[in-house]
Image (cartoon, rainbow, N blue to C red):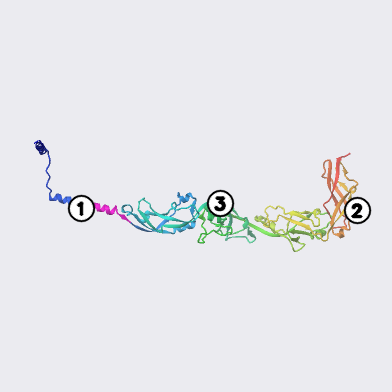
Amino acid sequence: MQLKETKAAAKELLSELPIRKPRRLKRSDITMLILSLVFALIIWLYIAVTIYTETSPKFTKLPITADITNTKASNYGLQLLPESEEYIQSMTVDCTLVGNRAAIGGLSRSDLEAYIDFDTDIIDRTGVQSLPIKIRTKNGAQFTKAEITPNRITVKMDHFTKKEVPVSDANHPNLSPDQDAIIREDKITYSPSKIEVRGPSELLNKLDHICVNLSDSETLTETKTFESGNFSYLDSDDKALTDSEGKELSSDVFEISANRFSVTIPIYYSRKFPVSVEITGIPGSIDEAALKDVIYRRLRIVSGNKTFSLPGYGEDNMTITIETSNINNKVSLEDRSSYNTLPIELSDLVPGKAITRSFPDAEGFESPDNISSVTFRLDDTDILTETRWLKNSEIDLQNRNDRFGYDLKSPDGNTQVTLCGTAEELAMVDSEDLKAYVNLINITEKGNKTSKINVILPDTVSGVWVIKPPSLALNVRDAE
């Protein structure tokens, strides 16, 4: 009974609520509903086909870039060799991208970049390495995968080092000297004379020096400086460094501290002269004929195992080349008939004994023969030395100073004199025939002194001289 009452009360309550009764659909409403469903389906299909489906566009002949900067290869200090760089520049790849149509559907060749991956498979090792080729988009568009042909490349790598290399050669095919001159190749100078070169160690180890190439054309009468930025890298055999194909390396294959050079081409005037010497300190007893016949004729130049005569006394003369880079000195060269060493004092000439004399320093002249001195020797085949004696008491003291008194240390003694000459003339000289004197003009103070004895030979001989004149010992005191 109670349940029935509850249901009745609920029914009455519901009847009082403002609930609208469903409206009966018209035909136009049904048509609009169907069109909305069709339009939604079309939009869904468009989005599914154009945005969410995959696509795989193909691209051909994409160039390859090779940027090692900030890669693992650069951290290892590795760089591509020039031949590999040239190979990479000549190579292309084909690529098929796979990815969302919305992301990659509108890409063109210019939007893609094929590059060598210097991180993934790189090894800290010089020589040949096989590295992957990859694709990236320049606008950041993402793709699922890329099929690349070829997908790897073989390159040659090396550590880059640096060293200082001399600039020591010049190629100047169109420069020629005046007819009387020569170009001294060994005297060519360069500025700078050394440069710092950085590059792959394999090539750098082969590099020995730089050769500057001059294209100037001129006949040179004097030393002149030229400039050029054309140069070659040469090995120790003066051969140009080449790549794997045998082509000469270009000048930019290395990083260098200078790429332009000044080259000074030296012009020298040159003549070859017979070597000679002047004999000085000749006593009045030796006339010119005896000087030539007895001394110059017998004097020899000794060089190693060879013996030479003085010019004018035989055909076997030693020669020396004398050059000057000063055109004003050219006349001086032309006026010479021989080139003399420093002179020899006659008293120093001892039969069979070697005497070395250097060449005088002559400003503006030099010799490419690098001969700084010559050894002379007197032929002793028919020449002798003999001893004579002088009485000290008979030696004349000349040019005395009135302020001093002079006492001989050995007034009763004798002084030995060594004479040199032919046996025939020496036999004509007795001790009694010799006269001697001491010149005191240079003695200006008291004390024990020695002074050279000047020996006067008799007029009957003309080919005899004194070897190493002796000295007289004196005590110089105040005059009484």
Mark 3 residue type? Lys
Question: Which badge, 3 or 2, is on the more N-terminal residue?
Answer: 3
Picture quadrant where residue 430 is located: bottom right
Secondary structure found at label 1: helix
Residues under labels 3 and 2: Cα distance? 80 Å
Q: Which residues are magenta?
A: 37-55
Front in this rendered view, residue 442 or 302 = 302
Q: Nearer the viewer, mark 3 or mark 2?
A: 3
Picture quarter with the N terminus: top left
Residue 413 image point, x, y percent = 90, 47
Residue identified by numbered label 3? 163
Tags 1 and 2 touching, CB below 8 Å: no
Tell me the residue at 27%/53% (across/down).
48
Front in this rendered view, residue 373 or 209 = 209
Residue 52 inside the magenta-drawn segment: yes
Tell me the residue at 38%/54% (across/down).
112
Q: Nearer the viewer, mark 1 or mark 2?
A: 1
Question: Which badge, 3 or 1, is on the more N-terminal residue?
Answer: 1
**Residue 38 numbered mark, or none:** 1
Picture quarter with the C terminus: top right
Mark 1 residue type? Val
Residue identified by numbered label 2? 432
Residue 171 image point, x, y percent = 57, 59
Secondary structure found at label 2: helix
Residue 326 horizontal side relative to residue 298, left or right: left
Residue 433 horizontal side relative to residue 201, left or right: right
